[in-house]
Image: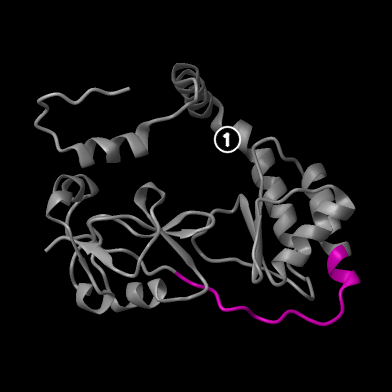
Amino acid sequence: MLLNEGCPIDVSLIRRGLDIFETSSPSYILLGGISKCLAQINSKGPELLKPWEDAIAYAESNLSSLRNFKLWQAPVRERSKFVLMGRGNYLFEYLRGTFNIECEASFPSHLIAMTGIGDTEETLKRFCDAVITTDNAMDGEYIPSEFVSRPFPKFAITLQEAARARLKSVDLEPEFAIGLPSSEFIYGFPPGIPLLMPGEIITEDTVKILSNSNIKLMLGGGRPYQGLIPVLP
Protein backbone atom coordinates (compact mmCIF):
# COMPACT_ATOMS: atom_id res chain seq x y z
CA MET A 1 0.00 0.00 0.00
CA LEU A 2 1.28 3.46 -0.94
CA LEU A 3 -0.10 6.49 0.92
CA ASN A 4 -0.39 9.78 -0.97
CA GLU A 5 -1.08 12.56 1.52
CA GLY A 6 -0.32 16.11 0.50
CA CYS A 7 2.12 14.95 -2.18
CA PRO A 8 2.64 17.48 -5.01
CA ILE A 9 3.15 14.68 -7.55
CA ASP A 10 0.09 13.88 -9.64
CA VAL A 11 -1.48 10.53 -8.76
CA SER A 12 -1.54 9.44 -12.42
CA LEU A 13 2.25 9.81 -12.60
CA ILE A 14 2.68 7.70 -9.47
CA ARG A 15 0.35 5.04 -10.90
CA ARG A 16 2.33 5.06 -14.15
CA GLY A 17 5.58 4.62 -12.24
CA LEU A 18 4.11 1.66 -10.36
CA ASP A 19 3.01 0.09 -13.66
CA ILE A 20 6.60 0.27 -14.88
CA PHE A 21 8.60 -0.60 -11.77
CA GLU A 22 6.34 -2.59 -9.46
CA THR A 23 7.10 -6.32 -9.36
CA SER A 24 6.19 -9.32 -7.28
CA SER A 25 9.64 -10.80 -7.90
CA PRO A 26 12.23 -11.00 -5.08
CA SER A 27 13.85 -7.77 -6.23
CA TYR A 28 17.11 -7.87 -4.29
CA ILE A 29 17.79 -11.46 -5.33
CA LEU A 30 16.94 -10.57 -8.92
CA LEU A 31 19.17 -7.49 -8.92
CA GLY A 32 22.00 -9.45 -7.31
CA GLY A 33 21.70 -12.10 -10.01
CA ILE A 34 21.74 -9.46 -12.75
CA SER A 35 24.88 -7.89 -11.26
CA LYS A 36 26.60 -11.28 -11.17
CA CYS A 37 25.61 -11.93 -14.80
CA LEU A 38 27.01 -8.57 -15.89
CA ALA A 39 30.25 -9.27 -14.08
CA GLN A 40 30.53 -12.64 -15.82
CA ILE A 41 29.83 -11.10 -19.23
CA ASN A 42 32.41 -8.35 -18.66
CA SER A 43 35.11 -10.81 -17.63
CA LYS A 44 34.32 -13.86 -19.79
CA GLY A 45 31.92 -12.56 -22.44
CA PRO A 46 33.50 -13.97 -25.63
CA GLU A 47 34.23 -17.31 -23.97
CA LEU A 48 30.65 -17.68 -22.70
CA LEU A 49 28.84 -16.41 -25.81
CA LYS A 50 30.90 -18.05 -28.60
CA PRO A 51 29.22 -21.52 -28.36
CA TRP A 52 25.80 -19.87 -28.45
CA GLU A 53 26.75 -17.74 -31.45
CA ASP A 54 28.09 -20.82 -33.28
CA ALA A 55 24.88 -22.72 -32.53
CA ILE A 56 22.75 -19.87 -33.91
CA ALA A 57 24.86 -19.73 -37.10
CA TYR A 58 24.42 -23.51 -37.47
CA ALA A 59 20.63 -23.19 -37.14
CA GLU A 60 20.42 -20.24 -39.55
CA SER A 61 22.23 -22.29 -42.18
CA ASN A 62 20.04 -25.36 -41.68
CA LEU A 63 16.78 -23.38 -41.77
CA SER A 64 17.62 -21.46 -44.93
CA SER A 65 16.22 -23.97 -47.46
CA LEU A 66 12.69 -24.67 -46.19
CA ARG A 67 9.85 -25.04 -48.70
CA ASN A 68 6.84 -23.94 -46.69
CA PHE A 69 8.51 -21.53 -44.28
CA LYS A 70 11.07 -18.77 -44.53
CA LEU A 71 13.50 -17.75 -41.81
CA TRP A 72 13.11 -13.99 -41.46
CA GLN A 73 16.45 -12.24 -41.69
CA ALA A 74 17.34 -8.57 -41.76
CA PRO A 75 20.62 -6.64 -41.53
CA VAL A 76 19.74 -5.58 -37.98
CA ARG A 77 17.89 -8.18 -35.92
CA GLU A 78 18.03 -10.15 -32.71
CA ARG A 79 19.70 -13.34 -33.96
CA SER A 80 18.83 -15.33 -30.85
CA LYS A 81 15.15 -15.14 -31.85
CA PHE A 82 14.08 -17.26 -34.84
CA VAL A 83 11.08 -15.90 -36.74
CA LEU A 84 9.76 -18.44 -39.24
CA MET A 85 7.35 -16.87 -41.73
CA GLY A 86 4.55 -19.15 -42.89
CA ARG A 87 1.74 -21.10 -41.21
CA GLY A 88 2.92 -20.33 -37.71
CA ASN A 89 -0.01 -21.85 -35.82
CA TYR A 90 0.33 -25.14 -37.70
CA LEU A 91 4.08 -25.33 -37.09
CA PHE A 92 3.62 -24.45 -33.41
CA GLU A 93 1.12 -27.26 -32.78
CA TYR A 94 3.14 -29.81 -34.80
CA LEU A 95 6.35 -29.06 -32.93
CA ARG A 96 4.55 -29.26 -29.58
CA GLY A 97 2.51 -32.37 -30.30
CA THR A 98 5.09 -34.41 -32.21
CA PHE A 99 8.44 -33.29 -30.83
CA ASN A 100 7.59 -31.80 -27.40
CA ILE A 101 9.16 -28.50 -28.46
CA GLU A 102 7.45 -25.43 -27.00
CA CYS A 103 7.99 -22.21 -28.95
CA GLU A 104 7.53 -18.65 -27.75
CA ALA A 105 4.48 -17.62 -29.79
CA SER A 106 2.55 -18.45 -32.94
CA PHE A 107 0.46 -16.44 -35.37
CA PRO A 108 -1.28 -17.25 -38.67
CA SER A 109 1.63 -15.63 -40.52
CA HIS A 110 4.69 -16.67 -38.47
CA LEU A 111 6.18 -18.47 -35.48
CA ILE A 112 8.67 -17.16 -32.92
CA ALA A 113 11.20 -19.51 -31.31
CA MET A 114 13.63 -18.26 -28.66
CA THR A 115 17.10 -19.52 -27.93
CA GLY A 116 19.27 -18.94 -24.85
CA ILE A 117 22.84 -18.96 -23.68
CA GLY A 118 22.47 -22.61 -22.68
CA ASP A 119 21.74 -23.69 -26.25
CA THR A 120 24.36 -25.63 -28.21
CA GLU A 121 24.58 -27.04 -31.72
CA GLU A 122 23.14 -30.25 -30.31
CA THR A 123 20.00 -28.63 -28.90
CA LEU A 124 19.43 -26.43 -31.97
CA LYS A 125 20.02 -29.43 -34.26
CA ARG A 126 17.05 -31.09 -32.58
CA PHE A 127 14.96 -27.97 -33.24
CA CYS A 128 16.12 -27.73 -36.87
CA ASP A 129 15.49 -31.43 -37.52
CA ALA A 130 11.96 -31.07 -36.13
CA VAL A 131 11.21 -28.01 -38.30
CA ILE A 132 12.63 -29.68 -41.42
CA THR A 133 10.60 -32.84 -40.73
CA THR A 134 7.45 -30.74 -40.36
CA ASP A 135 8.27 -28.81 -43.53
CA ASN A 136 8.77 -32.03 -45.53
CA ALA A 137 5.46 -33.41 -44.28
CA MET A 138 3.53 -30.44 -45.67
CA ASP A 139 2.22 -30.02 -49.20
CA GLY A 140 2.79 -26.85 -51.17
CA GLU A 141 5.33 -24.07 -50.97
CA TYR A 142 5.90 -20.94 -48.91
CA ILE A 143 3.36 -18.18 -49.54
CA PRO A 144 4.64 -14.76 -48.43
CA SER A 145 2.67 -13.13 -45.62
CA GLU A 146 2.15 -9.44 -45.07
CA PHE A 147 4.80 -8.37 -42.57
CA VAL A 148 4.46 -5.18 -40.54
CA SER A 149 7.73 -3.25 -40.33
CA ARG A 150 7.98 -0.50 -37.74
CA PRO A 151 9.43 2.77 -39.12
CA PHE A 152 12.62 3.99 -37.46
CA PRO A 153 11.44 6.39 -34.72
CA LYS A 154 12.28 10.07 -34.50
CA PHE A 155 11.81 11.90 -31.21
CA ALA A 156 10.78 15.48 -30.45
CA ILE A 157 11.58 15.07 -26.74
CA THR A 158 13.00 12.36 -24.48
CA LEU A 159 10.94 9.68 -22.75
CA GLN A 160 11.52 11.43 -19.43
CA GLU A 161 10.36 14.79 -20.76
CA ALA A 162 7.28 13.16 -22.30
CA ALA A 163 6.41 11.45 -19.00
CA ARG A 164 6.65 14.77 -17.13
CA ALA A 165 4.47 16.53 -19.72
CA ARG A 166 1.88 13.76 -19.76
CA LEU A 167 -0.66 15.82 -17.83
CA LYS A 168 -0.97 18.08 -20.88
CA SER A 169 -1.85 15.10 -23.09
CA VAL A 170 -4.89 15.20 -25.37
CA ASP A 171 -6.45 12.40 -27.45
CA LEU A 172 -6.67 13.00 -31.19
CA GLU A 173 -7.90 11.09 -34.21
CA PRO A 174 -4.85 9.52 -35.90
CA GLU A 175 -4.93 11.77 -39.00
CA PHE A 176 -4.82 14.88 -36.79
CA ALA A 177 -1.95 13.50 -34.68
CA ILE A 178 0.57 13.37 -37.54
CA GLY A 179 3.60 15.55 -36.80
CA LEU A 180 2.95 15.69 -33.04
CA PRO A 181 4.82 13.79 -30.30
CA SER A 182 3.06 10.89 -28.63
CA SER A 183 2.49 11.01 -24.87
CA GLU A 184 1.94 7.25 -24.48
CA PHE A 185 3.25 3.83 -25.39
CA ILE A 186 1.11 1.96 -27.91
CA TYR A 187 1.95 -1.74 -28.14
CA GLY A 188 1.21 -4.43 -30.70
CA PHE A 189 0.02 -7.40 -28.65
CA PRO A 190 1.11 -10.13 -28.52
CA PRO A 191 4.02 -10.04 -27.89
CA GLY A 192 3.88 -6.43 -26.62
CA ILE A 193 6.33 -4.64 -28.90
CA PRO A 194 6.10 -0.80 -28.81
CA LEU A 195 4.78 0.60 -32.08
CA LEU A 196 4.81 4.12 -30.65
CA MET A 197 6.72 5.57 -27.69
CA PRO A 198 6.32 8.72 -25.58
CA GLY A 199 8.06 11.65 -27.24
CA GLU A 200 8.12 9.94 -30.64
CA ILE A 201 6.90 12.00 -33.61
CA ILE A 202 3.81 10.44 -35.19
CA THR A 203 4.12 9.93 -38.95
CA GLU A 204 1.86 8.73 -41.75
CA ASP A 205 3.63 5.35 -41.58
CA THR A 206 2.84 5.14 -37.87
CA VAL A 207 -0.84 5.83 -38.53
CA LYS A 208 -0.94 3.15 -41.24
CA ILE A 209 0.42 0.56 -38.80
CA LEU A 210 -2.00 1.57 -36.05
CA SER A 211 -4.92 1.23 -38.49
CA ASN A 212 -3.95 -2.35 -39.38
CA SER A 213 -6.92 -4.46 -38.27
CA ASN A 214 -4.71 -7.56 -37.87
CA ILE A 215 -2.84 -6.04 -34.92
CA LYS A 216 -4.30 -5.91 -31.41
CA LEU A 217 -3.24 -2.60 -29.85
CA MET A 218 -2.80 -1.74 -26.18
CA LEU A 219 -1.84 1.45 -24.36
CA GLY A 220 0.57 1.58 -21.43
CA GLY A 221 -0.64 -0.19 -18.31
CA GLY A 222 -2.57 -2.77 -20.34
CA ARG A 223 -5.37 -0.39 -21.31
CA PRO A 224 -7.14 -1.10 -24.63
CA TYR A 225 -6.48 1.24 -27.55
CA GLN A 226 -9.74 2.96 -28.53
CA GLY A 227 -8.64 4.51 -31.83
CA LEU A 228 -7.40 7.84 -30.45
CA ILE A 229 -3.70 8.66 -30.08
CA PRO A 230 -2.63 10.50 -26.89
CA VAL A 231 -0.37 13.36 -27.98
CA LEU A 232 1.42 16.35 -26.51
CA PRO A 233 0.21 19.61 -28.07
Which residue is located at x 70 percent, y 59 percent?
A: 60
Looking at the rendering, the stretch of residues picked out in magenta corresponds to 134-149
Q: Dominant secondary structure of the magenta stretch?
A: loop
Left or right of 107: which side holds 190?
left
Quarter of the image containing the C terminus?
bottom left
* Front residue (pair 28, 19): 19
Specify the color scheme: one colour
At x 75% / y 48%, what residue is drawn? 102
- For label 1, count other residues whose C-alpha is less than 10 Å away and answer few (under 14), some (14-19) or many (20+): few
Quadrant where the N terminus lies?
top left
- Give 29 or 172, whichever is nearer the viewer: 172
Percent position of residue 152, x then y: 35, 66
- Residue 163 position (above or below residue 198): above
Q: Is residue 159 magenta?
A: no
Q: Nearer the viewer, residue 162 or 73?
A: 162
- Image quarter for residue 135? bottom right
Q: Which residue is mark 1?
A: 46
- Image coordinates of residue 35 in percent, x first then y, are 46, 22
Residue 141 is covered by the magenta coloring: yes
Q: How many marks?
A: 1
